[in-house]
Image: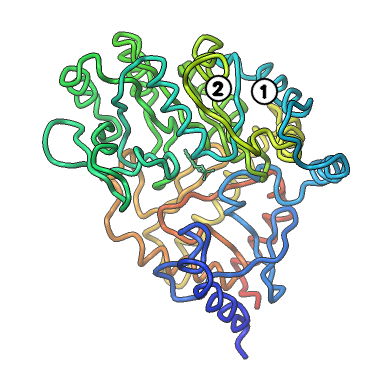
């Protein structure tokens, strides 16, 4: 029996019982020549498959685990929380503690509401923006991911600047038509949309650090421009900081750029690996939500006490020093990977560069990528070979060329020495 036969069998069974064998598409290893790994446990920077093979994890649950897997302080607090009960469907003090902590550290936000995922946060942010402005259209940028909200699953269509059509089955044409889509950095396009759809644009939504179709680092000037045009037109600026919030700095890209979005969405790190999303804005905007305002929003499990504790105990461990440490460790890891790729197997992977920002990195055969169309169209095949080579060596990246890598505080010097060792030798 080969070492992964057991996992092949699990995937075969999964495919019968679950569409495509997975509960989220990127987990399916589509296009790869190996079966998805089934992980049974994790600790620190390491994750273990059901055959007990150990991997250094650079996927980290796609971002939430900024402290690494199974951080002991979070773990202990979760055990205590479990003993108290795990869902009340009523007011409780735990979410208040988390809100209080967040507001003390996020000067651009006055009120917060919790939901259960980043998608839910975006869905609410869009409804809220439309409710506040009494306008329907929203500008979105190609290459930014905002979860699987109907109106965000769109691609460029033909016609006037911004015209969109659905990129997914099941999204009604009418819904797609209320979203305008533009290329990142397209200042003229944004201006044109505000002319063509005068007084109809409720909001511009952007990932201020787009990190879901590679890492498309934006010049600050572009983000400042969006802030200005929203001010001039009374449209709202929505920063989707589901990935960048608490990752690039505690206050995310809003803190780094000094730009105050009107509405901000959070997810991922805010729950420390438990399902939490959040919408934040001024008191004026937030009080448009039910039960005060007429914009409806609700959730049976929202502000789940266990998830609130997971989030609070994760965020409380993040400070200036931890972000500095993450930056230093990321640089070491990025240099190590980049150097290995240049030299490995007579330069088999020497086309690749490692772009990085704070503790996010992206492996791509190009030096500078600012928008979707800058990405070479044929990156998948080369990436897949690299992914499989690293996987064999016990190094786990997110299994797709367009996904970024995540460094956690558990990726310490000892892990980096281990990484170096794994790159030099093949550990079976
Ligand atoms: C992950 C992500 C989402 C979706 O969050 P889910 O919790 O997966 O629903 C939305 N926006 C951004 C920027 C994200 O990175």
Q: Which mark is residue 280?
A: 2
Q: Residue at x 36, y 39 (%)?
A: 152
User: Which image quarter holds the N terminus?
Assistant: bottom right
* Mark 1 in CB contact with mark 2 (< 8 angstroms): yes
Q: Is residue 71 above or below residue 279?
A: below
Q: Position of residue 385 (x, y in %)?
A: 43, 70
Q: Residue furthest bottom?
A: 1
Q: Which one is in front in this view, the residue at disc 1 or the one at disc 2?
A: 2
Q: Nearer the viewer, residue 228 or 21?
A: 21
| Residue 309 place in picture, x, y as percent | 76, 36
The image quadrant where one finds the C terminus is bottom right
Q: SS class of the residue under badge 2? A: strand
Q: Which mark is residue 102?
A: 1
Q: Is residue 389 left or right of residue 154?
A: right
* Residue drawn at x 34%, y 38% as measured from the top left: 151
Could you say which is closer to the camera, residue 250 or residue 328? Answer: 250
Q: Nearer the viewer, residue 48 or 356?
A: 48
User: Alpha-carbon distance for marks 1 and 2?
Assistant: 10 Å
Picture disc at residue 81: none
């Amino acid at each position: 029996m080969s070492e992964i036969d057991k996992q092949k069998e699990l995937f075969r069974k999964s495919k019968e019982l679950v569409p495509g064998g997975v509960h989220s598409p990127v987990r399916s290893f589509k296009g790869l020549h190996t079966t998805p790994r089934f992980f049974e446990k994790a600790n620190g920077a390491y994750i273990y498959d059901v055959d007990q093979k150990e991997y250094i994890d650079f996927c980290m649950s796609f971002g939430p685990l900024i402290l690494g897997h199974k951080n002991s302080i979070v773990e202990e607090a979760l055990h205590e929380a479990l003993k108290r009960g795990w869902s009340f469907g009523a007011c409780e003090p735990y979410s208040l503690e988390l809100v209080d902590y967040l507001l003390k550290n996020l000067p651009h936000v006055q009120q917060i509401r919790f939901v259960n995922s980043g998608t839910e946060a975006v869905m609410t942010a869009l409804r809220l923006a439309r409710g506040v402005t009494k306008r329907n259209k929203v500008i979105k940028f190609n290459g930014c991911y905002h979860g699987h909200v109907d109106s965000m699953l769109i691609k460029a269509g033909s016609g006037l600047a911004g015209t969109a059509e659905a990129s997914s089955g099941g999204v009604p044409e009418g819904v797609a038509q209320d979203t305008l889509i533009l290329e990142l950095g397209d200042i003229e396009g944004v201006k044109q949309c505000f002319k063509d759809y005068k007084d109809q644009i409720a909001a511009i939504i952007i990932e201020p650090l787009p990190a879901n179709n590679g890492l498309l680092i934006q010049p600050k000037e572009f983000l400042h421009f969006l802030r200005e045009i929203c001010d001039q037109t009374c449209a709202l600026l929505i920063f989707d900081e589901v990935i960048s919030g608490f990752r690039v700095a505690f206050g995310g890209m809003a803190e780094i750029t000094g730009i105050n979005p009107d509405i901000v969405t959070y997810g991922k790190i805010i729950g420390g690996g438990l399902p939490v999303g959040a919408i934040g804005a001024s008191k004026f905007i937030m009080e448009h939500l039910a039960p005060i305002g007429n914009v409806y929003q609700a959730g049976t499990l929202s502000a789940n006490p266990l998830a609130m504790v997971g989030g609070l105990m994760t965020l409380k461990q993040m400070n200036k020093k931890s972000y500095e440490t993450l930056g230093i460790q990321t640089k070491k890891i990025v240099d190590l990977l980049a150097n290995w790729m240049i030299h490995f197997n007579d330069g088999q992977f020497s086309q690749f560069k490692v772009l990085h920002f704070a503790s996010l990195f992206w492996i791509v055969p190009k030096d500078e990528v600012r928008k979707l169309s800058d990405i070479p169209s044929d990156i998948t095949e080369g990436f897949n070979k690299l992914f499989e080579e690293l996987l064999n060596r016990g190094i786990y990246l997110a299994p797709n060329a367009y996904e970024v890598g995540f460094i956690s505080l558990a990726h310490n010097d000892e892990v980096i020495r281990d990484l170096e060792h794994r790159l030099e030798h093949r550990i079976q």
